[in-house]
Amino acid sequence: MMPLELTCHACDVVLSAGSEDELVDLATEHASSVHGHTPPREHVVTRIRRHNP
Ligand SMILES: [Zn+2]
């Protein structure tokens, strides 16, 4: 199975994980620790699905 990827819209770092849930957690952690905000889970899921058709 291909890893899922998501590019952070704020800093262009590419995050990747083996499952959607993992990637949502990773992206949420990244936004929280690096950018100081926690995006709604639904928004992250939408961006992941758009990025990995
Ligand atoms: Zn970032």
Image (cartoon, grey):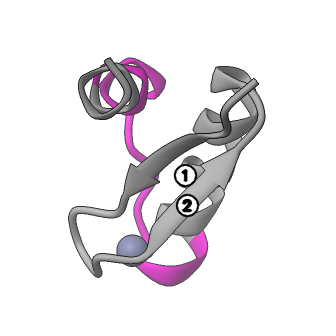
Question: Is the CB–ligand 1 distance for label 2 below 8 Å?
Answer: no
Residue located 56% across and 49% down the image: 28
Q: What element carries label 1?
A: helix
The residue under label 1 is which amino acid type? Ala
In the depicted structure, whether residue 27 falls above or below residue 42: below
Do the residues under discs 2 and 1 have CB atoms within 8 angstroms?
yes
In this rendering, position of residue 39 left or right of residue 15:
left
Residue named by callout 2? 15
Residue located 41% across and 77% down the image: 13
Residue located 29% across and 32% down the image: 47
The residue under label 2 is which amino acid type? Leu
Q: In which quarter of the image is the C terminus?
A: top left
Residue 39 falls in image quadrant: top left
Kindly identify which numbered label has been placed on residue 51.
Answer: none
Q: Please tell me in which quarter of the rendered image ligand 1 is found.
A: bottom left
Residue 21 falls in image quadrant: top right
In this rendering, position of residue 7 left or right of residue 50:
right
Percent across and percent down for residue 19 are 73, 26
Task: Mark 2 vs mark 1: give the one in front.
Answer: 2
Residue located 30% across and 27% down the image: 43
Residue named by callout 1? 27
Percent across and percent down for residue 34 are 50, 82
Earlier along the polypeptide chain: callout 2 or callout 1?
Answer: 2
Question: Is the CB–ligand 1 distance for label 1 below 8 Å?
Answer: no
The residues bearing labels 2 and 1 have C-alpha atoms spaced at a distance of 7 Å
Which of these two is toward me, 33 or 23?
23
In the depicted structure, whether residue 53 falls above or below residue 41: above
Q: What stretch is highlighted in magenta?
A: 33-46
